[in-house]
């Protein structure tokens, strides 16, 4: 992402997360039971951890960011920025997102408050 941004490309990040890795494992198992492809459990754990670890770094590089929570029946928009301006922050952020991007969220809230004065 950083190389693309440095080369002048606009970066759009759409991140869809779930509350924990157990939910990811359960969804893969459900998909397999319906005839879909399997992913080894070790890979799910590794990818989940890598994904949430990289999210704050990716958010910092991207020109536009949308973060969704897909833990329940409907996806829910949690956070949206464009050109370093916060457009939306949910008032009810799930713990997984606060834990992963809490610092970025607080900085965005502070910026938004300053702009609204």
Image: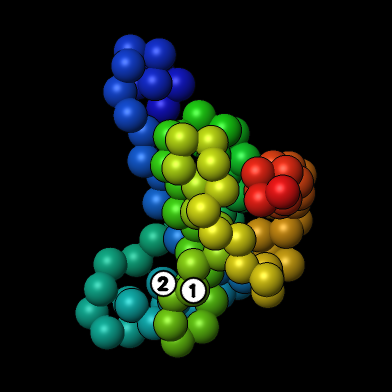
In the drawing, does residue 34 fall left or right of residue 5?
A: left
Q: Quadrant of the N terminus?
A: top left
Q: Position of residue 84 (x, y in %)?
A: 53, 36
Image vertical order of residue 17 relative to residue 9, above or below = below
Nearer-the-camera pick, 86 or 3? 86
Considering only order in the chain, which callout, 1 or 2, is on the residue closer to the N terminus?
2
The tally of labels here is: 2
Q: Position of residue 62 (x, y in %)?
A: 46, 34
Q: Furthest-front residue in view?
A: 117
Image vertical order of residue 22 relative to residue 15, above or below = below
User: CA–CA distance between discs 2 and 1?
Assistant: 20 Å
- Let me know if residue 103 appears in the view: yes
Secondary element at tag 2: helix
Nearer-the-camera pick, 57 or 82? 82
In the drawing, does residue 116 fall left or right of residue 86?
A: right
Res. 32 image quadrant = bottom left
Secondary element at tag 1: strand
- Residue drawn at (62%, 40%), measured in percent from left and top? 56
- Let me know if residue 101 appears in the view: no
Mark 2 packing: few (<14 Cα in 10 Å), some, or many (20+)? Answer: some
- Residue drawn at (36%, 33%), measured in percent from left and top? 11
- Residue drawn at (45%, 42%), measured in percent from left and top? 82
Q: Which residue is mark 2?
A: 28
In the drawing, does residue 97 fall left or right of residue 103?
A: left
Q: Which residue is mark 1?
A: 76
Q: Position of residue 34 (x, y in %)?
A: 27, 84
């Amino acid at each position: 992402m950083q190389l693309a941004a440095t080369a002048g490309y606009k970066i759009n990040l759409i991140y869809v997360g779930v509350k924990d890795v157990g939910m990811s494992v359960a969804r893969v198992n459900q998909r397999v039971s319906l005839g879909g492809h399997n992913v080894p459990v070790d890979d799910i754990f590794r990818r989940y951890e890598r994904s949430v670890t990289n999210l704050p770094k990716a958010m910092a590089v991207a020109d536009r960011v949308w973060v969704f929570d897909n833990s329940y029946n409907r996806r829910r928009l949690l956070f949206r920025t464009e050109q370093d301006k916060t457009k939306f922050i949910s008032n009810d952020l799930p713990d997984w997102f606060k834990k992963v991007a809490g610092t970025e969220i607080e900085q965005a809230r502070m910026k938004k408050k300053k702009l609204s004065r």
